[in-house]
Amino acid sequence: MRNFLVIVFVAVTLSGCGALGTYNPATQRRELIFISTPEEISMGQKIHQQLMKEEKLSRNPALIARVNRIGQKLALVSDRQDYEYHFYVIEKSDLNAFTVPGGNIYIYTGLLEKLTTDDEVAAVLAHEIGHCSARHTIKKYQAALGYNFVGDIILNKLNLGTNMKQIASLSSDALSSLVFSAYSRSDEYQSDKLGLKYMDLAGYDLNGMVKSFEALEKAGEKGSAPVFLRSHPYISDRIRAVKEEIAQMGPAGGSL
Ligand SMILES: [Zn+2]
């Protein structure tokens, strides 16, 4: 294992990444991402095609326009601007929203029905944009597929072009199977925090995040388990953390 890490270290250093990885302004850390943005987008397209075979998009033009209007406003202030964000409304009663590689964000009509104001809708979308900008989504994929990628990169003496071939060879099923795999708790907290930052920059009321979580908590108590929260930290802990963050962001952050 130690040898393997040494090889990775040498490989990465030689690759011209400089001091281990690339700086990510969202996480404020250097990160090792082996999948390039074009590769990520191509993965996203494959997953989207697969999702469209399984899910039905909403045909409600007002709802689609609303999600896009709010989503694009938030996307404009995201820390990650090297791809375009796309927002899709899926006709399904589940209380869920998720993001896949390449900047595609999906929200179910069931979840939208529980949210009242634009601020609450913005909270959910901003959280998902947080996963994009912090590169949680691609890191999750990289971790699951990583063994092959890293092995391939080393064996091919850092010929990153082979990455593309490997991604192209992955089936849509294999990629889609990872869509709902969980993020870590720290990733979820970080996305809430980034979500608040983007809501603030886009001019939304930060308390929309508290209210959206409370609405989901209430729905959960009534029995319809919010999928959006199932893999996430306890909702009460998230609400507390979000309230603390809003307080730290100062008087401009949210008006109770
Ligand atoms: Zn999340």
Image (spheres, rainbow, N blue to C red):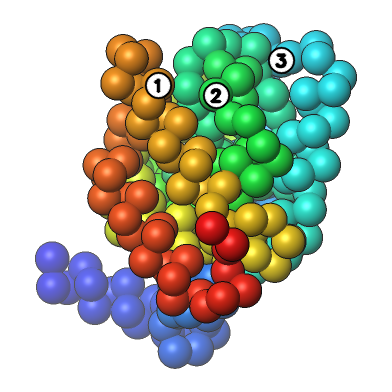
For label 1, the residue is 219
> Which numbered disc, 3 or 2, marks the residue that appears first in the sequence?
3
For label 3, the residue is 57
Q: CA distance from mark 3 to mark 2?
A: 18 Å
Q: Is residue 200 above or below residue 230?
A: below
Residue 18 seen in the figure: yes
Q: Is residue 37 above or below residue 2?
A: above
Residue type, numbered disc 2: Lys
Left or right? Give the position of 119 relative to 134: right
Residue 142 seen in the figure: no
Residue type, numbered disc 3: Leu
Left or right? Give the position of 25 relative to 12: right
Q: Position of residue 168 (x, y in %)?
A: 60, 37
Left or right? Give the position of 187 relative to 16: left
Left or right? Give the position of 5 relative to 209: left
* Ligand 1, image quadrant it occupies: top left
> Which numbered disc, 2 or 1, marks the residue that appears first in the sequence?
2
> Which numbered disc, 1 or 3, marks the residue that appears first in the sequence?
3
Tag 2 and tag 1, C-beta contact below 8 Å: yes
Q: Which is in the foreground here, disc 1 or disc 3? A: 1
For label 2, the residue is 114
**Regarding mark 1 in the picture, which secondary structure is present there?**
helix
